Amino acid sequence: MEESEWIEKVKNGDLVAFAEWMDIYSCDIERFAFQYGCSPEQAGEVAEDTFREVVQLMKTYVNEDSVQLELYKIAIKKFSDFELISPIPSSILAFEEDEQLHHQIVQLTSEEKLALILSQFHGMNDEEVAVIIGIPVDDARRTLTAAFDQLEGGNFGKRLEFLDKSHRRIRSMFRREIVFQDPVESLIEVRIEKKSMTKKALFSWIAGVSLLIILLTISVVTSEEYKRSSDEKYLARLKTSFENEMATKYMTLGLVEPKGEEQEFYSDMFGYDERQQFEGVTKKIQEQLTNNEKINRKNVQEQYGEIMGNLELPSEMVVKLLKKPLSDDRASSEVFIKAYINKVNWISDLYRVALYEHKGVITETVENGAIDVEELLQKKNTYPEEIRTVLGTMGDQNIGLVKESEWDYFHPIYLKNEVGLAIRDSIHEDFRGYLTFLGTNPFNYLAIQSGSTLQQTVDYIVELENTLLVDQQEDQLYQNVLGYYNNVFYDRFILNEDGRLTGSDGKLKKEYRLAWEKLANTGENSPSAYIMQQIVKEMEESDWETSDSLERLEYHHLYDAVGFAKRGDLQLFILESVMQESGNEVAVNNPEYIQEVERTYVKFTKGHRLNALVGVKPVVILGVYLYANEQEDPKTMWHLTNRESLSLTLNEYVTTWRKQEYQIEKADILVEEIGSNVLNGVPLTPISYEYKADFVYDSWLILDEGTGAWLIETAPKVIVKQ
């Protein structure tokens, strides 16, 4: 949204719009105050006072200067209300070099300091600096030069960059709600808060005092702390900074970071990779200390800065994106959206566990839809503090609540609102399908929300497909989207459960005709369009009653079509079933069968992900296993085998593997017999082959319940040799 639009909305009394705009700029003003010399607490108050004044200003704003510049001008006036802090306490900035440079900047004259901070940390040009300070442009340039002359030194630009990163890691003290309170009322509230300390706060205070006493006692008893080398202090402060950063992030989420055995509960967890990376960095530093080696602090700070950057919360990522859109930057858009979705998913998992632990506490009945969390909080003040904290912070990450009738607790859901639309407009169009994936499918990516119309579903499929066709990474997120895309297409358009696709006259319903025709005309290189074109043509010829292609269409076909389209060979895709009419036999020399085996092998070997085998028939899986043997690819054979039936690790298997002399080409047909066979309650199917009119049972496959893919349970030992 343009700045003029924000202003117009605020003039019309839209405080929600103002709050959203304030969320974008409050961190800048707070950081500006700290850089000038305020303490973190003072900086938070400066930002609160600034925006309180801006609320009134914008109601009568005439647009003499940018409102953003006006923010800085108002903030400067507020600085005089506070006594500047220099040097700052050592616990605020993690690095000694940052402390020293920060102190040097604070010691500059007011104009020199402002000119430097605005130009170097806030990206202002000379004209904007002059407007904010209230001096001529030439004076602004001379002032900036004077500041540089006093601070110039080795790697000065890099030192400023590191200091800026450290500034951005300081915990915010800005209180959004204070801005909208009457000044007198807020003062009363602060006094009441000071008088009525909660038990939790009291215990925290007592613990803090106890810790301080212990530290002071240690300092008195021994002088060892003063004998520690500069590098040892550096390492200790680095660890403290990281732990503070992690605690702050989780506090912002209203959660506590899982530790120890709790971590095993989560397959992925926000901050887990960053903690592992940080521990690797500190372990290396410790080894250097032990060996009396020199520590390259510049290199360490670069690594630390990268780790901290990866710890950005989804809300922080969105603020940066809106300030600097990536709609024309394809590579950066891909990095952003994949990191954003991963973080939303990890954080949603943490919220899901927290909600499950308090299931039954929230008793409101909801008819298959999202809940207004703020409304929920207004209605209920009897929830435990932990759940109230979670409910109060979920919305900041654009996560809400949803509940279906068969569940007895609420689930987190990514909200479909202006945030998602703003992200969509700010990233490259090639990757907007990932946002569609996130916004339309909140429950383990199994099915599209029931509230979507068929026409909307077509739009979703097309956008997902466009993203799949241009993304060459094919990472885990890609695989998830591919599976979701296939599910939406097959479950929503193809499966005719309970005759939902056809009317009482046996013909395809009109709404499905329109949706199929729309999908069939979405593009020349569209896999879904290519398949639907054949089906629609045949349906039209039969007056919308039957289609041979529709009868042959199987779950895996769209997967295969995507692979052909990405290679530029969509015209080679054949919509044929490799199975005979009985549905459980295939001729070994059937060209379509051989082609499907080879396609599946290529797709599976790209990452050996089991979800690439979902929907693939057991006879094809066995064919891939035999084909991998011919290719002398034991790694793929190991991945195709049920883990519980393996006694060897991958390395052991590959090391001891010897090629089997299978003669599958001498067999006539392969037969799968899916029936009532089970192993520990898990479905099994034997695969036999016909040779000289005899059927030989030589292998068994088992269903992997986690993915729904068939895997080798008992590997073939003979295959013809008679």
Image (cartoon, rainbow, N blue to C red):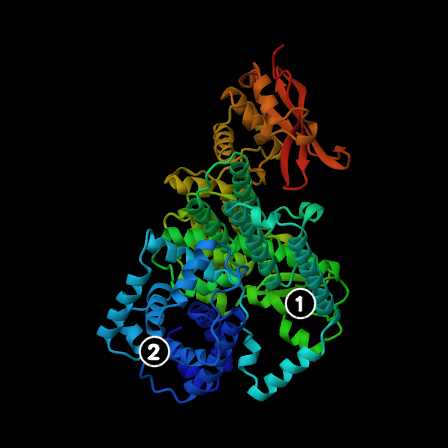
Which label was assigned to residue 66?
2
Name the residue tied to disc 1: 389
> Which residue type carries mark 1?
Thr
Please tell me which of labels 1 and 2 falls first in the chain.
2
Q: Is residue 455 visible?
A: no
- The front one of 282 and 295 is 295
Please tell me which residue lies in front, 537 or 588.
588
Residue drawn where x is 50% and y is 53% of the image: 308
Quadrant in the picture for the C terminus: top right
Q: How many marks overall?
A: 2
Q: Which amino acid type is shown beneath numbered disc 2?
A: Ser
Mark 1–mark 2 distance (CA, rounded to whole Å): 37 Å
Question: Is residue 652 left or right of 332 when viewed as pictured?
Answer: right
* SS for dot 1: helix
Residue 181 shows in the view: yes
Crowding near the residue tagged with mark 2, few <14, some 14–19, many ≥20 C-alpha atoms within 10 Å:
few
